[in-house]
Image (cartoon, grey):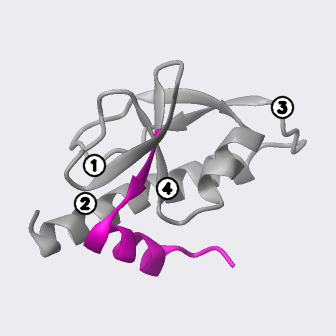
């Protein structure tokens, strides 16, 4: 996989992750068991699909800057590996240049 393409894909997925963090911040009260609709964080152009997670589940994924939450089938095996699969949702971890870019773009402390 082309290194530049991997970086662009990671940057695109980071945009959706920032949208989801805005959704997460807008939840009040901050109940970890509350189910919320999040955007699929895949790299597919035009994907506006939603998936449902609890705040606690999203935080568990988000704790690792290389991990993203996607709908099953939206993963790119040449750029990411599936680390969890449940109920039509997959958690992927970016590898190689994409993983490095995801870490660089991570805005959490």
- Residue 98 lies within the magenta run: yes
- Quadrant containing the C terminus in the rendered view: bottom right
Horizontal relation, residue 80 to residue 69: left or right: left
Relative image position of residue 96 (x, y in whole percent): 29, 70
Classed neighbour count for the residue bearing mark 1: other residues with Cα under 10 Å, few (<14), some (14–19), many (≥20): many
Q: Are marks 1 and 3 in contact (CB under 8 Å)?
A: no
**Disc on the earlier residue, 3 or 4:** 3
Q: Which residue is mark 1?
A: 43
- Residue 92 lies within the magenta run: yes
Mark seen at residue 17: none
Horizontal relation, residue 39 to residue 26: left or right: left
| Separation (CA) of disc 2 from disc 3 | 31 Å
Classed neighbour count for the residue bearing mark 2: other residues with Cα under 10 Å, few (<14), some (14–19), many (≥20): many
| Separation (CA) of disc 3 from disc 4 | 21 Å
Q: Which residue is mark 4?
A: 67
Relative image position of residue 105 (x, y in whole percent): 45, 76
Range covered by the magenta-colored residues:
91-109
Q: Which residue is mark 3?
A: 33
Relative image position of residue 79 (x, y in whole percent): 25, 56
Name the front one of labels 3 and 4: 4
| Separation (CA) of disc 4 from disc 2 | 13 Å
Q: Are marks 4 and 2 in contact (CB under 8 Å)?
A: no
Task: Please give the name of the residue rendered at 51% of the width and 52% of the height, measured from the top-left corner.
Answer: 19
Relative to 24, say whether 50 is above or below: above
**Disc on the earlier residue, 1 or 2:** 2
């Amino acid at each position: 996989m082309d290194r530049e393409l991997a970086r662009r894909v990671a940057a695109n997925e980071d945009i959706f992750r920032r949208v989801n963090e805005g959704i997460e911040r807008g939840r009040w009260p901050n109940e970890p068991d509350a189910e919320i609709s999040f955007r699929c964080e895949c790299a597919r152009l035009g994907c506006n699909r939603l998936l449902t997670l609890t705040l606690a589940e999203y935080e568990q994924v988000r704790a690792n800057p290389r991990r993203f939450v996607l709908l099953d089938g939206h993963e790119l095996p040449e750029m990411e590996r599936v680390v969890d699969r449940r109920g039509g949702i997959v958690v992927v971890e970016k590898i190689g240049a994409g993983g490095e870019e995801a870490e660089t773009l991570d805005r959490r402390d």
